[in-house]
Image (spheres, rainbow, N blue to C red):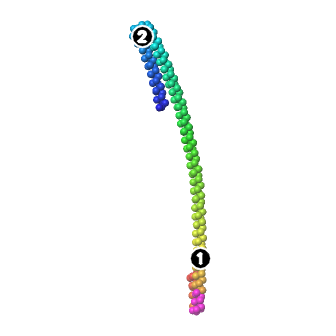
Amino acid sequence: MSLQDKLNENRSMSELFQETRELNELMKSYIRVHMNEEMAKEVTIHNQLNQIQSKSDEVMRNMQSILNEQEKMLKENTEVLQKILIDGHEEIQRNNNRTIQALGELQKTNNAQLEEMNEEIKSSVRNMQNNLNSVVKKARQETMDLVSSAKHGALVTNIIDALKYGVATSAITVPILYLLLS
Protein backbone atom coordinates (compact mmCIF):
# COMPACT_ATOMS: atom_id res chain seq x y z
CA MET A 1 0.00 0.00 0.00
CA SER A 2 1.48 3.34 -0.97
CA LEU A 3 2.06 6.30 1.30
CA GLN A 4 -0.69 8.29 -0.42
CA ASP A 5 -3.21 5.46 0.12
CA LYS A 6 -2.32 5.33 3.83
CA LEU A 7 -2.78 9.10 4.19
CA ASN A 8 -6.15 8.93 2.40
CA GLU A 9 -7.21 6.09 4.69
CA ASN A 10 -6.21 8.19 7.74
CA ARG A 11 -8.30 11.10 6.50
CA SER A 12 -11.28 8.81 5.90
CA MET A 13 -10.98 7.46 9.44
CA SER A 14 -10.91 11.00 10.85
CA GLU A 15 -14.06 11.85 8.90
CA LEU A 16 -15.76 8.71 10.23
CA PHE A 17 -14.91 9.70 13.80
CA GLN A 18 -16.40 13.12 13.26
CA GLU A 19 -19.59 11.60 11.84
CA THR A 20 -19.78 9.22 14.82
CA ARG A 21 -19.64 12.17 17.23
CA GLU A 22 -22.35 13.98 15.33
CA LEU A 23 -24.55 10.87 15.35
CA ASN A 24 -24.03 10.50 19.10
CA GLU A 25 -25.14 14.07 19.60
CA LEU A 26 -28.18 13.48 17.41
CA MET A 27 -29.01 10.32 19.33
CA LYS A 28 -28.87 12.22 22.63
CA SER A 29 -31.14 14.90 21.26
CA TYR A 30 -33.56 12.34 19.83
CA ILE A 31 -33.75 10.41 23.08
CA ARG A 32 -34.31 13.56 25.14
CA VAL A 33 -37.03 14.89 22.83
CA HIS A 34 -38.99 11.64 22.50
CA MET A 35 -38.68 10.44 26.05
CA ASN A 36 -41.93 10.33 28.07
CA GLU A 37 -40.76 8.22 30.91
CA GLU A 38 -40.09 9.01 34.43
CA MET A 39 -37.22 11.09 35.59
CA ALA A 40 -35.34 8.07 36.89
CA LYS A 41 -35.34 6.48 33.52
CA GLU A 42 -34.32 9.77 32.00
CA VAL A 43 -31.37 10.07 34.35
CA THR A 44 -30.41 6.46 33.65
CA ILE A 45 -30.58 7.00 29.91
CA HIS A 46 -28.64 10.22 30.26
CA ASN A 47 -26.00 8.37 32.26
CA GLN A 48 -25.94 5.61 29.69
CA LEU A 49 -25.57 8.17 26.92
CA ASN A 50 -22.74 9.79 28.81
CA GLN A 51 -21.11 6.40 29.18
CA ILE A 52 -21.63 5.74 25.47
CA GLN A 53 -20.20 9.16 24.67
CA SER A 54 -17.16 8.64 26.88
CA LYS A 55 -16.63 5.14 25.43
CA SER A 56 -17.00 6.58 21.94
CA ASP A 57 -14.53 9.36 22.78
CA GLU A 58 -12.09 6.79 24.16
CA VAL A 59 -12.42 4.66 21.02
CA MET A 60 -11.90 7.74 18.87
CA ARG A 61 -8.80 8.71 20.84
CA ASN A 62 -7.46 5.19 20.44
CA MET A 63 -8.20 5.25 16.73
CA GLN A 64 -6.57 8.67 16.39
CA SER A 65 -3.55 7.33 18.25
CA ILE A 66 -3.40 4.39 15.84
CA LEU A 67 -3.67 6.76 12.89
CA ASN A 68 -0.90 8.94 14.29
CA GLU A 69 1.28 5.86 14.79
CA GLN A 70 0.60 4.72 11.23
CA GLU A 71 1.47 8.16 9.90
CA LYS A 72 4.71 8.12 11.90
CA MET A 73 5.55 4.67 10.55
CA LEU A 74 4.81 5.82 7.00
CA LYS A 75 7.16 8.77 7.41
CA GLU A 76 9.88 6.48 8.79
CA ASN A 77 9.34 4.02 5.94
CA THR A 78 9.53 6.88 3.46
CA GLU A 79 12.85 7.99 4.94
CA VAL A 80 14.18 4.42 4.87
CA LEU A 81 13.10 3.98 1.25
CA GLN A 82 14.70 7.28 0.26
CA LYS A 83 17.94 6.22 1.95
CA ILE A 84 17.82 2.86 0.15
CA LEU A 85 17.27 4.63 -3.17
CA ILE A 86 20.15 7.03 -2.54
CA ASP A 87 22.46 4.23 -1.41
CA GLY A 88 21.45 2.13 -4.43
CA HIS A 89 22.14 5.03 -6.77
CA GLU A 90 25.55 5.58 -5.18
CA GLU A 91 26.36 1.85 -5.45
CA ILE A 92 25.38 1.85 -9.12
CA GLN A 93 27.62 4.89 -9.67
CA ARG A 94 30.53 3.15 -7.92
CA ASN A 95 29.97 0.01 -10.02
CA ASN A 96 29.87 2.10 -13.20
CA ASN A 97 33.13 3.81 -12.22
CA ARG A 98 34.79 0.44 -11.52
CA THR A 99 33.55 -0.89 -14.86
CA ILE A 100 34.89 2.16 -16.70
CA GLN A 101 38.23 1.80 -14.94
CA ALA A 102 38.41 -1.93 -15.77
CA LEU A 103 37.58 -1.20 -19.41
CA GLY A 104 40.32 1.45 -19.50
CA GLU A 105 42.85 -1.01 -18.10
CA LEU A 106 41.70 -3.66 -20.57
CA GLN A 107 42.11 -1.18 -23.41
CA LYS A 108 45.64 -0.33 -22.22
CA THR A 109 46.50 -4.03 -22.07
CA ASN A 110 45.06 -4.62 -25.54
CA ASN A 111 46.97 -1.63 -26.92
CA ALA A 112 50.20 -2.89 -25.37
CA GLN A 113 49.63 -6.38 -26.82
CA LEU A 114 48.82 -4.92 -30.24
CA GLU A 115 51.95 -2.77 -30.11
CA GLU A 116 54.04 -5.81 -29.16
CA MET A 117 52.52 -7.84 -32.00
CA ASN A 118 53.15 -4.95 -34.39
CA GLU A 119 56.81 -4.82 -33.35
CA GLU A 120 57.13 -8.60 -33.78
CA ILE A 121 55.59 -8.38 -37.25
CA LYS A 122 57.92 -5.51 -38.20
CA SER A 123 60.91 -7.48 -36.93
CA SER A 124 59.82 -10.59 -38.84
CA VAL A 125 59.31 -8.57 -42.03
CA ARG A 126 62.75 -6.95 -41.61
CA ASN A 127 64.34 -10.38 -41.08
CA MET A 128 62.54 -11.78 -44.13
CA GLN A 129 63.62 -8.77 -46.19
CA ASN A 130 67.23 -9.10 -45.01
CA ASN A 131 67.19 -12.83 -45.80
CA LEU A 132 65.67 -12.14 -49.23
CA ASN A 133 68.26 -9.43 -49.93
CA SER A 134 71.00 -11.83 -48.86
CA VAL A 135 69.65 -14.59 -51.14
CA VAL A 136 69.31 -12.14 -54.06
CA LYS A 137 72.84 -10.81 -53.48
CA LYS A 138 74.22 -14.36 -53.29
CA ALA A 139 72.32 -15.38 -56.46
CA ARG A 140 73.60 -12.29 -58.26
CA GLN A 141 77.17 -13.06 -57.20
CA GLU A 142 76.84 -16.69 -58.30
CA THR A 143 75.35 -15.56 -61.63
CA MET A 144 78.22 -13.14 -62.16
CA ASP A 145 80.71 -15.87 -61.25
CA LEU A 146 79.06 -18.28 -63.72
CA VAL A 147 79.05 -15.64 -66.49
CA SER A 148 82.69 -14.81 -65.81
CA SER A 149 83.58 -18.50 -65.76
CA ALA A 150 81.66 -19.06 -69.02
CA LYS A 151 83.50 -16.14 -70.67
CA HIS A 152 86.80 -17.46 -69.45
CA GLY A 153 85.91 -20.98 -70.67
CA ALA A 154 84.88 -19.62 -74.07
CA LEU A 155 88.15 -17.69 -74.33
CA VAL A 156 90.19 -20.76 -73.43
CA THR A 157 88.21 -22.84 -75.95
CA ASN A 158 88.75 -20.21 -78.60
CA ILE A 159 92.46 -20.09 -77.90
CA ILE A 160 92.70 -23.87 -78.11
CA ASP A 161 90.72 -23.83 -81.38
CA ALA A 162 92.95 -21.11 -82.69
CA LEU A 163 96.00 -23.17 -81.93
CA LYS A 164 94.38 -26.10 -83.63
CA TYR A 165 93.26 -24.32 -86.77
CA GLY A 166 95.94 -21.90 -87.20
CA VAL A 167 97.43 -18.98 -85.59
CA ALA A 168 96.80 -16.68 -88.50
CA THR A 169 93.09 -17.10 -88.57
CA SER A 170 92.91 -16.88 -84.83
CA ALA A 171 94.81 -13.66 -84.59
CA ILE A 172 91.87 -11.84 -86.10
CA THR A 173 89.02 -13.91 -84.63
CA VAL A 174 90.13 -14.04 -80.99
CA PRO A 175 90.19 -10.28 -80.35
CA ILE A 176 86.80 -9.86 -82.07
CA LEU A 177 85.24 -12.65 -79.97
CA TYR A 178 86.80 -11.26 -76.87
CA LEU A 179 85.26 -7.88 -77.56
CA LEU A 180 81.89 -9.43 -78.28
CA LEU A 181 81.80 -11.56 -75.13
CA SER A 182 82.89 -8.83 -72.76
171 vs 57: above or below: below
Q: Which residues are magenta?
A: 157-167
Camera sees residue 112: yes
What's the residue at 51%, 23% (across, down)?
Answer: 65
Q: Specify the amino acid type for callout 2.
A: Arg
Can you tell which mark lies on residue 142?
1
Camera sees residue 174: no
What's the residue at 58%, 59% (across, down)?
Answer: 117
Q: Position of residue 154 (x, y in %)?
A: 58, 84
Q: Position of residue 35 (x, y in %)?
A: 40, 10
Task: Give the mark count.
Answer: 2
User: Does residue 32 appear left or right of residue 111 in this picture?
Assistant: left
Q: Which residue is mark 2?
A: 32
Q: Is residue 18 magenta?
A: no
Secondary element at tag 1:
helix
Q: Position of residue 101 (x, y in %)?
A: 58, 47
The residue carrying pointer 1 sits among few (fewer than 14), some (14 to 19) or many (20 or more) residues within 10 Å by Cα, namely: few
Q: Specify the amino acid type for callout 1.
A: Glu
Label 2 vs label 1: CA separation?
142 Å
Along the viewing direction, whichever of 166 and 114 lies nearer the viewer: 114
Along the viewing direction, whichever of 154 and 77 lies nearer the viewer: 77
